[in-house]
Image (cartoon, rainbow, N blue to C red):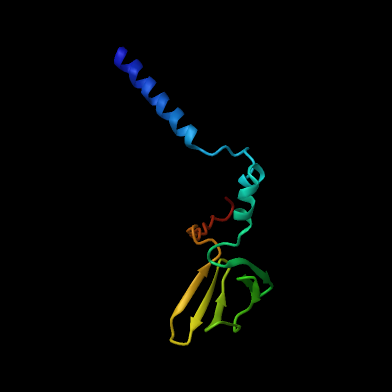
Amino acid sequence: MLAATLGLLGVGMTGTAWAQAMRDPTRPPPQFLDPADAAEAATPPASGLQTIKRTGKRRMALLHGEWIKPGDRMGEAVVEKIDDQSVVLKYQDGRRETIRLYPEVEMHSSKVVKRAAGK
């Protein structure tokens, strides 16, 4: 009986410790708490890719503060294509560089499930 009680107590304590490490979703963003954090939050992402705009089949991207479209030159590279989440640059030596909108997020496509008729 004592072993069971100690086991339950241990499980309860690990849950509490884990919960304390979680971020409070109701807490305001850091820039509202400390003015010094506002400048850090306002800086563009490290990749330089800020947003991708899609109008019909036409795509544009805001890269390093400049709107670009496929075929435009960016320094030594040409914008080869713009996807929903990335821009591909092609250099004169043939190498390609993919700049992602959210480099820290790994995206996966979901599978389409077909349902039988009438279900």
Residue furthest top as drawn: 1
Q: What is the total number of numbered labels drawn onto the structure image?
A: 0
Question: Quarter of the image containing the N terminus?
Answer: top left
Q: Foreground: 76 or 38?
A: 38
Residue furthest bottom as drawn: 92
Q: Is residue 60 above or below residue 111?
A: below
Picture coordinates of residue 23, whole percent (x, y) = 54, 39
Which residue is at 51% across, 57% downward? 113
* Res. 86 image quadrant: bottom right
Which residue is at 63% across, 78% downward? 69
Q: Is residue 108 above or below residue 93?
A: above
Q: Is residue 11 above or below residue 33?
A: above
Residue furthest front as drawn: 36
Which residue is at 57% across, 62% downward? 45
Q: Is residue 103 above or below residue 23?
A: below
Q: Foreground: 108 or 82?
A: 82
Picture coordinates of residue 53, whole percent (x, y) = 66, 69
Picture coordinates of residue 50, whole percent (x, y) = 61, 65
Which residue is at 35% across, 16% downward? 5
Picture coordinates of residue 17, whole percent (x, y) = 44, 30
* Res. 14 image quadrant: top left
